[in-house]
């Protein structure tokens, strides 16, 4: 690494705080918040979002409509503010393959990111498709899922390989994290026209190892949960890296993972404490950043500069415990919705800091 690169890293990581044990945030959890019909099941809850009317949208891996290969597992469900089931959106949609994330934009449009089909779909509030990004492999001939090769295949403009999330800047430009095989952020204008991309596979500043979740602040800066590098990278809308955040909070001695052995020093960074699986930013004049990890299964409340203000939760199967939080929605500072992969549920959390 050059002397210039070392200096750049020193500047870019200036928001990394030497963390002591922050306070525990008391909270209540409602794991039965969603009222599902008798014949409907979530399966793995991959995504959750809340619109301006406080309707809750859940993107889950609970469907099975017959794919060309692998399992089809995507269903997009809408619930009223009290958890009453309202409707399923996009039933038997061509893009449905393997749910990953759902987001709601400022106009209450619904965006679904499907990792399995390599597609991102925009629905209007009525649930009709209005914009399509990416294209899945055709079912003819010998089509199959993308495989990981080293060095990685080059990313292609307008196409995705296992995308993960979406967000927007103040001008309505669209940013898509892409993803498990590609390692970049793709930028489109508000009309869906391709603009640019940035990032590639690696661990240096501006590179990614599974950019897994995204959020934007009031200034339009783009926060990318670089899960495999155990950090959150913050960019301006042009793609310039501003800084990074690393969450270093001591792990309780008795902490146990949801399954398997406690991670050791040789475990991948994805399963290390503080690796951001999911992030969200609260609305309002004073914003807060929430991040969740896979082990020890905690949620961290941070300032936008990266200071950890409090923590809550742990791994487990019971209410107020978490099994791989995959996406969070934070419509208010003390109101969170968390979608869990392993526990097949969405919990509504009310914080009492």
Image (cartoon, grey):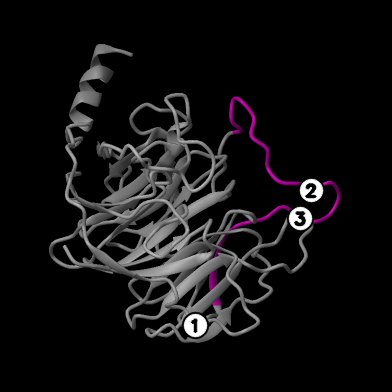
Comes first in the chain, label 3 or label 1: 1
Q: Which residues, given as a range, are shown in magenta? A: 129-153
Quadrant of residue 108 in the image? Answer: bottom left
**x and y percent of residue 274 in the render?**
33, 41
Please state, as top left, top right, bottom left or bottom right, where the N terminus lies in the image: top left
**x and y percent of residue 60 in the render?**
56, 66
Q: Is residue 245 above or below residue 60?
A: above
> Marks 2 and 3: CB-CB under 8 Å?
yes
> In this figure, which residue is indicated by the disc labeled 1?
35
Query: Label 3 crowding class (10 Å Cα cut-off): few <14, some 14-19, many 20+?
Result: few
Considering every residue shown, the one lying at the far left of the view is 285
Q: CA distance from mark 2 to mark 1?
A: 39 Å
Please state, as top left, top right, bottom left or bottom right, where the C terminus lies in the image: bottom left
* Numbered badge on residue 138: 3
Quadrant of residue 225 in the image? Answer: top left
Query: Label 2 crowding class (10 Å Cα cut-off): few <14, some 14-19, many 20+?
Result: few
Q: Secondary structure at mark 3?
A: loop
Asked whether 175 or 72 is in front, the reply is: 72
**Residue visible at 42% across and 76% down?**
56
Q: Secondary structure at mark 1?
A: loop
Please indicate whether residue 190 sits to the left or right of residue 98 in the image: left
Comes first in the chain, label 2 or label 1: 1
Q: CA distance from mark 3 to mark 1?
A: 36 Å
Main SS category, magenta section: loop
Q: Secondary structure at mark 2?
A: loop
């Amino acid at each position: 690494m050059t002397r210039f690169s070392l200096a750049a890293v020193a500047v870019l990581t200036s928001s990394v705080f030497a963390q002591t044990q922050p306070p525990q945030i008391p909270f209540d959890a409602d794991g039965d918040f969603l009222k599902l019909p008798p014949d409907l099941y979530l399966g793995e809850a991959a995504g959750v979002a809340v619109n301006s009317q406080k309707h809750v949208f859940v993107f889950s891996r609970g469907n099975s409509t017959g794919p060309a290969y692998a399992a089809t597992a995507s269903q997009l469900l809408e619930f009223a503010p009290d958890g009453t089931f309202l409707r399923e959106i996009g039933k038997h949609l061509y893009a449905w393959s393997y749910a990953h994330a759902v987001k709601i934009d400022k106009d209450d449009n619904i965006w679904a990111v499907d990792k399995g089909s390599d597609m991102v779909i925009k629905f209007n509030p009525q649930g009709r498709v209005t914009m399509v990004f990416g294209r899945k492999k055709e079912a003819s001939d010998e089509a199959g899922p993308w495989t990981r090769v080293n060095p990685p295949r080059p990313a292609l403009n307008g196409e995705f390989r296992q995308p993960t999330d979406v967000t927007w800047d103040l001008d309505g430009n669209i940013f898509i994290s892409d993803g498990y095989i590609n390692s970049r952020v793709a930028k489109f204008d508000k009309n869906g026209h391709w603009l640019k991309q940035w990032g590639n596979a690696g661990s240096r500043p501006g590179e990614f190892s599974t950019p897994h979740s995204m959020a934007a602040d009031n200034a339009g800066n783009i926060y990318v949960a670089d899960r495999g590098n155990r950090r959150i990278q913050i960019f301006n809308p042009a793609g310039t890296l501003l800084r990074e955040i690393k969450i270093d909070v001591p792990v309780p001695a008795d902490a146990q993972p949801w399954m398997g052995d406690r991670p050791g020093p040789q475990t991948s960074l994805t399963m290390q404490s503080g690796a951001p699986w999911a992030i969200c930013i609260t609305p309002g004049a004073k914003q807060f950043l929430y991040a969740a990890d896979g082990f020890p299964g905690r949620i961290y409340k941070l300032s936008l500069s990266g200071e950890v203000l409090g923590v809550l939760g742990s791994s487990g199967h019971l209410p107020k415990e978490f099994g791989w939080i995959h996406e969070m929605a934070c419509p208010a500072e003390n109101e969170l919705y968390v979608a869990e992969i392993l526990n097949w549920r969405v919990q509504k959390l009310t914080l009492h800091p």
